[in-house]
Image: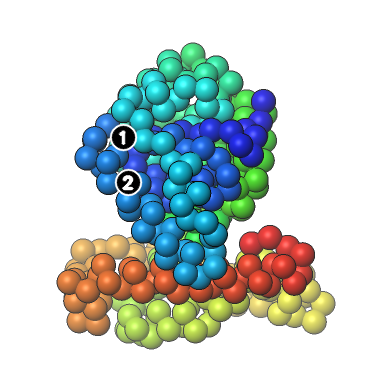
């Protein structure tokens, strides 16, 4: 059974990621049951979500904030949150023992057909679901923070996850206007973090060897690659960057990239002294006391970009 547009989902854990998921589901018309083991976090969650929704409304990204907030249902017990739901999104801290404990509870309480999804960004489902009677319904649904502005969601099962569960999870993400990607086999960090890690590895290496400072590196991405990558991925980028497409690009530049890869192979990107240097450079550019304000600045611009991309999607018939 697929979650219907007027159905109910549960969000377990009401920190930043849980709040983000609540916005995603509630703005799509779903009733969202909220539960957190920390009663104070649960009591604050609706107000924090409402504040984010007001900011989204100011950019035309949601309408009728009171109606969306009305779909949020804080629940005093896990049993109440899971009653009758078709889908559960767990967003507790990134520790395998916590994941294992909560999934044992979820599997015991949730309706038998409900999908149990975890927001983990690095722990494979097999690490905490193997011994569950309902392990076939467990899956990773890894978002990017904040998920209501950055829509990609990595869907990854354990070896025993039922294919129908992957299909249903991806279908739900499509329905709530996210952009699901099926990761076909478990791997550490999934796809997004591995791509980010590859770029960071070279960024740290270039900085360490004195080719560029931190601002110059960030500018290269911000005012270079990042502009194209806001609208297309690396394969489409190179497909458009040679007269005859991707194979032509690889024929022209493959040798250069092979040479660079050999040079990169032995680099150690995270030595403590280098991290300390970079951290000091970043703190000189942005004092620690201003980090929270800068995050708000970032989200404000993500909202503007999301609104712009919505307009482009309407023009070309594609979704973001």
Please tell me which residue is depicted at 41% across the width and 36% down the height of the picture: 73
Q: Which residue is mark 2?
A: 45
| Position of 1 relative to 90 (above/below) | above
Q: Quadrant of residue 22?
A: top left
| Position of 133 relative to 242 (above/below) | above
Left or right: 113, with 121 as reference point: right
On-image quarter of the N terminus: top right
| Position of 132 relative to 90 (above/below) | above
Please tell me which residue is depicted at 63% across the width and 67% down the height of the picture: 310
Helix, strand or loop at label 1? It is: loop
Which one is in front, 58 or 177?
58
Say few, some or many: other residues with alpha carbon within 10 Å of mark 2 (under 14 / 14 to 19 / 20 or more): many
Please tell me which residue is depicted at 47% across the width and 55% down the height of the picture: 65
Q: Position of residue 156 (x, y in %)?
A: 55, 39
Left or right: 171, with 245 as reference point: left
Which one is in front, 178 or 129?
178
Say few, some or many: other residues with alpha carbon within 10 Å of mark 1 (under 14 / 14 to 19 / 20 or more): many
Residue 283 visible? The answer is no
Identity of the residue furthest to the right in this view = 244
Please tell me whether mark 1 or mark 2 is closer to you in this view.
Answer: 2
Q: Position of residue 151 (x, y in %)?
A: 55, 56
Q: CA distance from mark 1 to mark 2?
A: 10 Å
| Position of 277 relative to 161 (above/below) | below
Q: Are marks 1 and 2 in contact (CB under 8 Å)?
A: yes
Q: Position of residue 306 (x, y in %)?
A: 55, 68
On-image quarter of the C terminus: bottom right
Residue 208 visible? The answer is yes
* Image color mode: rainbow
Left or right: 33, with 292 as reference point: right
Q: Which residue is mark 1?
A: 36
């Amino acid at each position: 059974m697929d979650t219907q547009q007027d159905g109910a989902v549960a969000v377990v854990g009401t920190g930043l990621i849980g709040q983000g998921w609540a916005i995603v589901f509630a703005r799509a018309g779903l009733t969202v049951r909220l539960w957190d083991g920390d009663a104070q976090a649960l009591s604050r969650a609706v107000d924090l979500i409402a504040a984010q929704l007001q900011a989204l409304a100011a950019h035309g990204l949601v309408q009728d904030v009171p109606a969306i907030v009305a779909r949020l249902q804080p629940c005093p017990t896990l049993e109440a949150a899971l009653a009758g739901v078709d889908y559960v999104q767990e967003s507790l801290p990134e520790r395998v023992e916590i994941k294992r404990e909560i999934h044992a509870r979820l599997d015991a309480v949730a309706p038998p057909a409900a999908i149990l999804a975890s927001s983990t960004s690095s722990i494979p489902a097999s690490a905490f679901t193997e011994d569950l009677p309902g392990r076939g319904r467990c899956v990773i649904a890894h978002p990017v923070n904040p998920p209501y502005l950055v829509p990609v969601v990595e869907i990854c099962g354990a070896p025993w996850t039922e294919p129908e569960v992957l299909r249903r999870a991806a279908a739900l993400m499509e329905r709530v206007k996210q952009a699901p990607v099926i990761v076909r086999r478990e791997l550490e960090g999934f796809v997004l973090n591995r791509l980010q890690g590859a770029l960071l590895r070279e960024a740290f290496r270039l900085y360490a060897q004195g080719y560029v400072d931190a601002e110059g590196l960030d500018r290269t991405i911000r005012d270079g690659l990042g502009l194209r990558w806001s609208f297309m991925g690396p394969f489409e980028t190179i497909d458009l960057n040679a007269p005859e497409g991707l194979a032509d690009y690889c024929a022209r530049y493959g040798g250069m990239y092979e040479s660079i890869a050999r040079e990169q192979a032995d680099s150690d990107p995270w030595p403590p002294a280098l991290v300390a240097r970079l951290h000091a450079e970043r703190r000189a550019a942005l004092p620690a006391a201003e980090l929270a304000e800068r995050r708000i600045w970032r989200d404000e611009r993500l909202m503007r970009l999301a609104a712009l991309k919505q307009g482009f999607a309407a023009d070309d018939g594609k979704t973001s």
